[in-house]
Amino acid sequence: MLRIANSAYYGFRRKISRIQYAIVGVGFNAVKELAISQKVCELFQKDDHFEGYSRTALWEHSVAVALCNKLIYMRKFRQFGENVYSVGLLHNIGIVIEDQFLQKEFKDVLVQSRKDKCNLPDAEKHILGFDHTEIGRALTDNWDFP
């Protein structure tokens, strides 16, 4: 948090050395984004590569979508937007759930997707009976996300 507050992006005139000042300086949304990013990042610590899938690549994609969401929202509405970063970061949470809790089936999905040259949701529906978007929706509904 201190590193972020002292970055050129915020451009404070003096060095911020206390967490309380950093939080006030960068704002609660930045703190929330950092916390969510840090927690989600933990899911990607071990990067297994299989059938063209990489946790690191999924993480990079998710962060890129989150940042693009934020930039587009700010440009269009001239506001920060409470949840646009989080939505972008978590938009593929269903894939993370499959990777973490349905590993064998997820590998089967990836194999079929490559073998049949079909998209991921089609392979998921064929093998699992549902796709990662449905998992994500169920999870965020359960978490009572807006």
Image: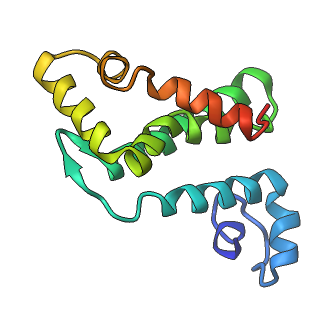
Q: Residue 17 in the image: x percent, y percent? A: 77, 84
- Specify the quadrant that holds the C terminus: top right
Farthest residue to the bottom: give it.
17
100 in relation to 61, above or below: below
Q: Quadrant of residue 115?
A: top left
Q: Nearer the viewer, residue 66 or 125?
A: 125
Residue visible at 45% across and 21% down? 130
Lateral position of residue 27 relative to residue 45, left or right: right
Residue visible at 48% across and 41% down? 62
Residue visible at 14% across and 16% down? 116
94 in relation to 119, above or below: below
Residue visible at 74% across and 41% down? 143
Q: Residue 66 in the image: x percent, y percent? A: 57, 39
Farthest residue to the left: give it.
115
126 in relation to 91, above or below: above
Q: Residue 125 in the image: x percent, y percent? A: 37, 18
Q: Quadrant of residue 142?
A: top right
Q: Nearer the viewer, residue 115 or 29?
A: 115
